[in-house]
Image: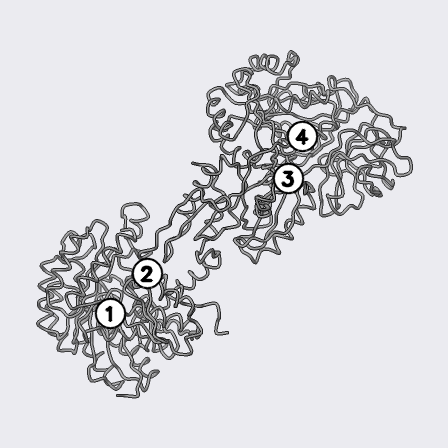
Amino acid sequence: MSTALDHIRNFSIIAHIDHGKSTLADRLIQYTGGLTEREMSAQVLDNMDIEKERGITIKAQTVRLDYKAKDGDTYTLNLMDTPGHVDFAYEVSRSLAACEGALLVVDAAQGVEAQTLANVYQSIEHDHEIVPVINKIDLPAAEPEKVRAEIEEVIGLDASDAVLASAKSGIGIEDILEAIVKRIPHPKGDRSAPLKAMLVDSWYDPYLGVVILVRVIDGVLKKGQQVKFMQAGTLHLIDRVGCMRPKIEQLDELAAGEVGFITAQIKEVAQTRVGDTITDAKRPALEALPGFKVVQPVVFCGLFPVDANDFEKLRESISKLRLNDASFSFEMETSAALGFGFRCGFLGLLHLEIIQERLTREYDLDLITTAPSVVYHVNLSHNNGVLELHNPADMPDANRIDFIEEPWIEAVIYCPDEYLGSILKLCQDRRGIQKNLTYVGGRAQITYDLPLNEVVFDFYDRLKSISRGYASFDYHQTGYREGDLVKMNILVNNEPVDALSMIVHRVAAEARGRHMCERLKDLIPRHLFKIPIQAAIGGKVIARETIAAMRKDVTAKCYGGDASRKRKLLDKQKEGKKRMREYGSVSIPQEAFIAALRMGDEG
Amino acid sequence: MTERPPLGLYIHWPFCVSKCPYCDFNSHVRDEVDHAAWRETLLADLRHEAALTPGHELTSIFFGGGTPSLMPPATVAALIDAATGYWPVADDLEITLEANPSSVEAGRFADLAKAGVNRLSLGLQSLDDDALRFLGRAHGVAEGLAALDVAQGQFDRVTFDLIYALPDQDLAAWEAMLHRALGFGTTHLSLYQLTIEPGTRFATMVQQGGLLPKDADEAADFFELTQAMTADAGLPMYEVSNHAAKGQESRHNLVYWRYQDYAGIGPGAHGRRGGMATMRHKKPENWMAALARNEHGCQEETVLSLRDRAAERLLMGLRLVEGLAIPDWQAAYIDWDRVDRLVIQGLMTRQGNHIAASANGMLLLNALIDACFKGDDDGR
């Protein structure tokens, strides 16, 4: 039987990385008896290795806790763990839409961190009741009163009732649970109205098929029910209804206000769209829930196997990952330099890194990633329409192009004052337009308009390195603007190397080209002849380096006992050649491509 | 002209007084050696090889090591006697022995000559005392030159080794040393650029940053100077690191480079026997035990594929200034387009099926061999 609305609380946890979100979640599960001590592995909710390592959540997770409050009643608490990165902003917004409140966890020693702000404001936008929790109060450096004042000053929240806690030592856990019950409003909804449930997230489980995380807004979801996904327009038969504690528990139904999961014999995550409205097929809701969006990849790159024989394995692995993550796209691509691979689209750079890392780690693939690209709008001359371009290889001839538009973003960067100067310089260098600069409690908040293509080119890495990791960065796309964009080719011994061509702003081209030539000069081994390396736009060379011819490569001693060894060395050399590609009779080791593509903007 | 294919015999004596920091040869330091047992065991190993190579003509014997000048001359004599009894012998049979240029060993040169050795290869290594210390050699320059003098009095042919392009050697110093070396009147010289071999003490020093080998450009300058000076002195290069007056080339080593058959006995010795690669047990004790067990010291006998033989014949043959003629069976493993391109670049020469590295090409031999050898075909 489902729980009465006024005994349900749906909430999320907002915290800066390292401020103790996962530890607190684990503690809440443990306190309410969700798992025994033995079953608690470190950070239960982040169940992917990468999530654990990076301390970020990629997929929304949920756990249902039964809590017997001091008033004697038992409440159902649903903790929604939300994706914690800007790449997944839409997913975050759907998770937040499924809650009525949030715990704001702030480290008692470190105070409010910049990253927290963005998430808090998002939560406030969803009309959430926010319960501040000052964590790690047992640390020697803890200054709870100072932090309390900071929360009020910086965020503008009343922190007089903030809960003092230490998730690690188990201090204040009951107070937190009480605060959730007393202060976070219960969900509203009408059990008897036509079914309206929000698809919050979905993932592929090898035993259950696609598992869908739902929040029921109105009506009841039951096993055996025929439902309709209103945005997708598909019909499905519900075969399981349940909740996570965090172990799966099957239920008969989920009613208005509740959070749980369903399965409906769906094979691919791609069939389920985050934010879709699930309704009853026979008695449908009149209108779908607001806020649905189809997410589009914004960053593209090529993924190639280092060993050409791994292509099929890569295809299989990408297909498998796609089962669980419908937000990235892929299609086959061939490159003269790198062979067969895939052009993949991602929600952002972190998303790209995650997919790349999972392929490498979980599927044991050695990959080459080409330079990330954004989607350009190429307006063809003579009103021949607009071409969406995300691969430099597809760039039409200059005379067919009227003008090119590129995506821009509004970026918000928070950082300690001391790094402000170098961060402003970085933004200026990346063609940024400063929009705002304010100070929030000893930190600067900088707002910039930036072209996305400057950001995908290692902006985040640079930002982290110049601010020693203290700067945080948030962005959203603001639309397309015309830009003076050109395709830059890299020529080795006068032959263009497809994998290294890129679309750049004309102003940045020379520096980028020079840097690439310098790097390649060090990466390509000397040959028996000298090798020119050039960067060119169209027919115009904008940077040039020359690799001198090899002068000496001979073994001093080779007698009767050495024949076998030298032959084996020769074979090894030949084997190494297989990992090289030839351009204008120059053998370029694959490592050189990898290094050149990974290089970043160190110059 | 004989119908019999030539055969070189290599005899390995694995013991040294101490191990040099650049040396990656199969050498061992032992307190005591049972000379009677070693003589009998080497003779047994020789007997085994002789039985498997009938019909060859013995053209050379080479005692290498280790330090074969530490062998009792009686053992040397016994091995020479046995070998010349097993095979028909060429009129100009060359018998070389490698020697350390110490005063102790110089005292045995007369006995070694009496045993039949007619060519001595002296490990002089340098004409600079600091360099000798750096190379871990026990002898000094004066002692070495005295040994050379003794050797020249005892043997028809004497050659010696020098190691050059040491990390702190400059071009002028090498020029002076080589000039002096060319004046000693030997008709053969082996001039090796210092090579850091994996597993040696020098390799460890390089890894730890204590030793900085010369870069390829500088090493090339040293090589070119060496070629010019030796050619002027009438001892031109005939192999990458070997120089001789006409007719004074090491016949034994030519067997390797011309990819003819050679028998290798003693610990770790390699041989080529009719398309088969033979390898003796490396560790002296294991080799002894194998002989006691099997009456031969072989650890491995591998039939080489046509492809592997083509590779070896190419990589050995191109080391010679004379180059090599490619027979039909080998031609399929040669990338002739590449050869022709290298000819245009001036790095190789070609007359029909005869190819050779040019003077410029010799410096880039590894790259040339890699370019010319077509190894993917596997005979298809």
Residue of label 4: A30
The location of residue A529, given as percent across then percent down, is 37, 56
Q: Looking at the picture, which amino acid does disc 2 mark?
A: Leu
Total marks placed: 4
Q: What separation in Å lies between label 3 and label 4 (alpha carbons)?
A: 58 Å
Q: Looking at the picture, which amino acid does disc 3 mark?
A: Asn
- Which numbered circle lies on residue B285? none
Q: Report the residue at 14% width, 54% height from top.
A: B128
Q: Nearer the viewer, residue B67 or A458?
A: A458
Q: Nearer the viewer, residue B343 or A223?
A: B343
Q: Looking at the picture, which amino acid does disc 4 mark?
A: Gln
- Which numbered circle lies on residue B238? 1
Q: Are marks 1 and 4 in contact (CB under 8 Å)?
A: no
- Which numbered circle lies on residue A379? 3
Of the residues tagged 1 and 4, which is closer to the observer? Answer: 1
| Chain of the residue under label 2 | B
Q: What separation in Å lies between label 3 and label 1 (alpha carbons)?
A: 68 Å
Q: Are marks 3 and 4 in contact (CB under 8 Å)?
A: no
Q: Residues within 10 Å of mark 4 (few under 14, many from 20)?
A: some
| Chain of the residue under label 3 | A
| Chain of the residue under label 1 | B
The location of residue A157, given as percent across then percent down, is 65, 14
Q: Quadrant of residue B21?
A: bottom left
Mark 3: which secondary structure?
strand
| Chain of the residue under label 4 | A
